[in-house]
Image (cartoon, rainbow, N blue to C red):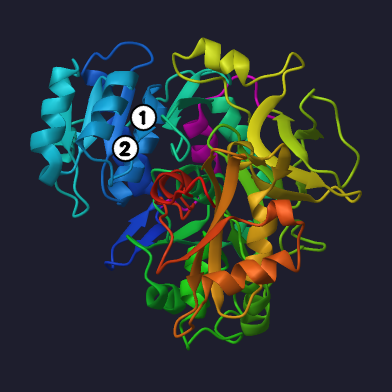
């Protein structure tokens, strides 16, 4: 059971192996960090943060490149009892101004190359402290913390105390700060440790290839938490490099990635079943995994990718089983402790197999949106279920399939059109690599669909033929009014297609 009172760092520390001189992190630059290094480094940073006399609940914002020192900063923030705010390095000035203005962090940590403009924004917003941290173990933060003691008693924190403020990706509108507590994250880490059968040192020990960014739920709370709560070594890649992953596979047992990473790995001739023979588990999430990728991976490697489903607001919610049938196209069943239901617009459960809105509740569901009490109230039902905004169905065996976002639903002439259904048909057509279907305004129908299609390398696609093939497969009201063939789809850092960009880029004339 999840402790009623706990600092998340203490749970990680309790899982460190007895031999603190063992390697905790091996980097692609040839550096080796022991568990004692993580303990001492995070202690020094925690002591330095506390020396700044920050207010209770102070936010520590970090827009830094991926590094083990950045991981230590996260652990230090937890140890000291402050609130961590990870920010994407791709964010520009307008975005950073919003996040800093909304979260009001007491400390902002950025790369030295961005210090000029980031510090200006931070100081204008009232942030008293701005430090630098680079991916080569340099920066003013480390210089200042180098003089701090390397012993630190973790601050007392309870399960419902705020630990992280993480902003939603904003693919459908203004980003909102999701408030995650120590209890939210500890409960999810413990459930996944058991559900994915993480192996203890006595069982041979797991080794994780960490090739994801660390400003997002997937890389920070699923991957890193999974390794730390199990005392497992990480092979740390500063950025995803398919050849570096291939080199690491014989020394690892677990890999987590977004679908794009699996596609890029499949493009490597060196990916073989023999190379993957030491691996135990491949996990995919953050975006839909195409059935072709799922099946090709099985054929090439002999492994079946485990797909799961989660959100910034909830961490992980469902997962295909570790032992049992992993179904392509499905994100599996609700995790232990998660209550999931599929409902209609009146919040009434629908029969198994019917499409509806996905609602959830459980110990990993967040505490609400930062300084948005009205929005928080809107997103929860009277019974305490969180409205995920996703649309899907659950079969009689409990397996959940995501159909799309409720905001992506197209209502054309009074009929509901689900983009994911059309995308699955289009993706199966010869020469198609991937597709996205979005709704755009239309004078007669209110909304109509537009298909944006990416061809396979060397393939020639005809937009009119694609629409004609769709008409032979689905009801006429579902068929997009127009089709565009493009080189690639716009994506955010976690590989999700940014449909909001497509909606503004492609329009349909009233006569169509």
Q: Quadrant of residue 307?
A: bottom right
Q: Residue at x 87, y 47 (%)?
A: 353
Q: Residues within 10 Å of mark 1 (few under 14, many from 20)?
A: many
In the image, 15 versus 144, the foreground residue is 144
Q: Quadrant of residue 255?
A: bottom right
Q: Residue furthest left?
A: 116
The residue to which callout 2 is attached is: 73
Magenta stretch: residue 31 in it? Answer: no
Q: Residue at x 34, y 56 (%)?
A: 33
The reply, left or right, for residue 196 in relation to residue 155 is: right
In the image, 94 versus 162, the foreground residue is 94
Vertical order, 199 against 434 (above or below):
above
Residue 237 in the image: state x and y as whole percent: 36, 63
In the image, 73 versus 353, the foreground residue is 353
Looking at the rendered structure, the secondary structure element under dot 1 is: helix
- The answer to whether mark 1 and mark 2 are in CB contact below 8 A is yes
Asked if residue 196 can be seen in this view, the reply is: no
Vertical order, 318 against 490 (above or below):
above
Report the span colored magenta: 1-20
The reply, left or right, for residue 51 in relation to residue 10 is: left
The residue to which callout 1 is attached is: 77
Residue 116 in the image: state x and y as whole percent: 8, 36
């Amino acid at each position: 059971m999840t402790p009623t009172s706990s600092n998340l760092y203490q749970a990680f520390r309790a899982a460190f192996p007895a031999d603190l001189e063992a390697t905790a992190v091996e980097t692609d630059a040839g550096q080796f960090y022991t568990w004692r290094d993580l303990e001492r480094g995070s202690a020094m940073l925690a002591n330095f943060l506390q020396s700044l006399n920050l207010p209770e609940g102070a936010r520590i914002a970090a827009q830094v490149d991926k590094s083990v020192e950045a991981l230590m900063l996260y652990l230090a923030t937890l140890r000291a009892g402050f609130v961590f705010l990870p920010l994407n390095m791709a964010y520009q000035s307008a975005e950073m101004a919003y996040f800093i203005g909304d979260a009001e962090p007491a400390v902002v940590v950025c790369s030295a190359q961005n210090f000029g403009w980031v510090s200006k924004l931070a100081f204008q917003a009232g942030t008293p402290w701005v430090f630098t941290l680079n991916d080569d173990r340099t920066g003013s933060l480390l210089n200042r913390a180098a003089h701090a003691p390397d012993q630190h008693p973790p601050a007392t924190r309870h399960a419902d105390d705020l630990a992280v403020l993480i902003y939603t990706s904003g693919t459908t509108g203004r980003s909102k700060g999701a408030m995650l507590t120590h209890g939210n994250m500890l409960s999810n880490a413990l459930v996944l440790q058991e559900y994915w059968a993480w192996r203890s040192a006595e069982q041979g020990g797991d080794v994780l290839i960490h090739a994801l960014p660390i400003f997002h739920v997937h890389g920070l709370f699923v991957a890193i938490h999974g390794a730390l709560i199990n005392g497992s070594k990480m092979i740390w890649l500063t950025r995803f490099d398919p050849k570096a992953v291939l080199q690491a596979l014989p020394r690892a047992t677990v890999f987590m990635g977004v679908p794009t990473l699996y596609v890029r790995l499949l493009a490597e001739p060196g990916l073989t079943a023999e190379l993957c023979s030491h691996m135990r588990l491949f996990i995919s999430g953050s975006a839909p995994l195409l059935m072709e990728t799922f099946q090709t991976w099985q054929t090439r490697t002999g492994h079946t990718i485990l797909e799961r489903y989660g959100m910034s607001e909830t961490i992980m919610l469902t997962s295909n089983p570790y032992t049992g049938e992993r179904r392509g196209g499905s994100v599996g069943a609700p995790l232990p402790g998660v209550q999931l239901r599929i409902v209609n617009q009146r919040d009434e459960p629908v029969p198994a197999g019917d499409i509806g809105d996905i609602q959830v509740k459980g110990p990993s569901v967040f505490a609400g949106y930062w300084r948005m009490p009205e929005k928080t109230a809107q997103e929860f039902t009277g019974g305490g279920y969180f409205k995920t905004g996703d649309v899907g169905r659950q079969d009689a065996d409990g397996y959940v399939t995501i159909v799309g976002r409720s905001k992506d639903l197209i209502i054309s002439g009074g009929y509901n059109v689900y983009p994911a259904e059309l995308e699955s048909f289009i993706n199966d057509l010869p020469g198609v690599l991937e597709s996205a279907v979005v709704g755009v305004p239309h004078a007669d129908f209110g909304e109509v669909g537009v298909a944006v299609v990416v061809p396979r390398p060397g393939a020639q696609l005809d937009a009119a033929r694609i629409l004609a093939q769709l008409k032979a497969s689905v009801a006429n009201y579902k068929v997009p009014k127009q089709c565009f063939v493009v080189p690639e789809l716009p994506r955010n850092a976690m590989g999700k297609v940014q449909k909001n960009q497509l909606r503004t880029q492609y329009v349909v004339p009233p006569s169509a």
